[in-house]
Image (cartoon, rainbow, N blue to C red):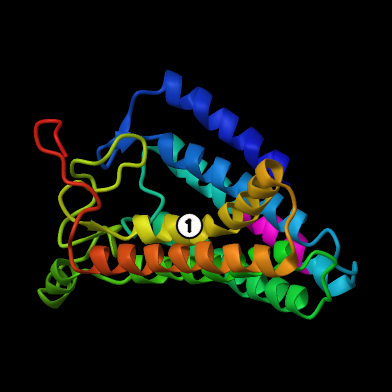
C-alpha cells in the first residue's frame, strides 16, 4: 500500500510538470504529490513499527483499513486537482461537500486506528527498548499532530460572519490563522509568510514518527550501539525537543505569527 501511495505521488509529479493550473495560488498537483509522498512514508513507518508484533486479526484489519483509507484520501485529492477544485475545506457544491466530508471521516478513522496500533505496541514487550521508545514517542506525537487537522476545519471568524449574514460559504476552515489561504507562501511547502499556519505544527507532529527512529539508527551507525540507558537518555532529550518544537509551532500559528516572514528575499 505504501508503494501504491508512492506511485500516485509519481503520477501527481508528472501532472505537476504538464499541468500549470493554480488552485488557491498553488500548483494544482502539488497537494496530491505531497500527500502521496507523506502517505507512502506513513504506511512504510507503520509497517516497520509493527513488524515484530504478533499478527493478530485485529492488527491486520487495523493496518489494512489504515492503508486503504490513506490511498482513498490521495485519490480524492487527485480527483479534485483534476477538476481544478480545492480538496480541503471546499463546500461549494454537494459533490465538493461530500468529498470533503468523506475525507474527514476517513482521516478520523485512521486517527483512531493509529491509536489502536500504539496501544498494541505498548502492550508488546520489545526486543529493542530504545527503538520501541522511539516508535512510541514518535507515533504519539504523530497522533497529536494529526489532531491539528481538526482545528483547520473549524470556521474562521470571517466565515462565521458571512453565515450570520445568511450568505452560503464556499469554503469552511483554513490552514492559516488571521488570513485567507492562498497568500504568499514559502517555496514548496506553501506555508504562509504573512500569517500563522497550522500546517507547520501539523508537519512537525506527524513526521516525528520517522524522525525519532531514524535518528536513533543514525546515532548507532556513527557511534555504535550504546547501553539501553544511554540510548533512552538520548531519545528522551531529542523527543523532548520535538515535543517542544511542536508546542512552539502550534502556539506561533494560533497567535498568527508566520514561521518565517520574508520581505524582499531577506528573512
Rendered image quadrant of residue 226 = bottom right
In this rendering, would 225 be left or right of 38?
right
Q: Is residue 11 above or below residue 133?
A: above
Q: Majority secondary structure of the magenta segment?
A: helix
258 or 169, which lies in front? 258
In the image, is residue 63 part of the stretch drawn in magenta? yes
- Going 67% across and 72% down the picture, which residue do you hit? 113
Q: Mark 1 points at which residue?
A: 99
**Can you see residue 90?**
no
SS at circle 1: helix
Mark 1 nearby-residue class (10 Å; few <14, some 14–19, many ≥20): many
* The C terminus, quarter of image: top left
- Residue segment shown in magenta: 62-70
Residue shown at 36%/69% (left/top)? 247
User: Which image quarter: residue 8?
Assistant: top right
Q: Position of residue 136 (x, y in %)?
A: 65, 69
Amino acid at each position: 500500500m505504501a508503494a501504491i501511495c508512492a506511485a500516485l505521488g509519481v503520477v501527481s509529479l508528472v501532472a505537476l510538470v504538464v499541468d500549470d493550473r493554480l488552485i488557491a495560488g498553488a500548483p494544482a498537483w502539488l497537494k496530491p504529490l505531497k500527500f502521496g509522498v507523506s502517505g507512502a512514508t506513513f504506511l512504510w513507518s507503520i509497517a516497520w513499527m509493527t513488524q515484530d508484533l504478533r499478527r493478530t486479526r485485529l492488527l491486520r484489519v487495523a493496518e489494512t483499513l489504515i492503508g486503504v483509507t490513506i490511498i482513498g484520501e490521495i485519490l480524492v485529492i487527485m480527483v479534485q486537482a483534476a477538476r481544478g477544485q480545492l480538496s480541503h475545506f471546499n463546500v461549494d457544491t454537494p459533490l465538493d461537500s461530500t468529498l470533503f466530508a468523506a475525507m474527514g471521516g476517513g482521516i478520523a478513522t485512521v486517527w483512531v486506528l493509529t491509536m489502536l496500533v500504539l496501544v498494541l505496541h505498548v502492550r508488546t514487550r520489545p526486543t529493542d527498548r530504545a527503538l520501541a521508545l522511539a516508535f512510541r514517542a514518535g507515533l504519539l506525537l504523530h497522533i497529536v499532530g494529526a489532531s491539528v487537522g481538526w482545528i483547520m476545519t473549524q470556521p474562521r471568524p470571517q466565515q462565521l460572519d458571512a453565515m450570520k449574514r445568511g450568505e452560503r460559504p464556499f469554503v469552511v476552515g483554513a490552514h492559516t490563522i488571521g488570513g485567507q489561504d492562498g497568500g504568499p507562501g514559502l517555496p514548496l511547502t506553501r506555508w504562509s509568510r504573512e500569517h500563522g499556519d497550522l500546517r507547520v505544527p501539523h508537519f512537525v507532529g506527524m513526521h516525528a514518527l520517522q524522525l525519532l527512529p531514524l535518528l536513533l539508527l543514525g546515532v548507532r551507525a556513527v557511534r555504535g550501539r550504546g547501553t539501553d540507558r544511554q540510548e533512552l537518555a538520548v531519545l528522551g532529550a531529542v523527543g523532548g525537543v520535538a515535543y517542544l518544537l511542536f508546542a512552539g509551532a502550534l502556539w506561533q500559528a494560533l497567535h498568527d505569527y508566520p514561521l518565517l516572514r520574508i520581505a524582499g528575499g531577506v528573512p
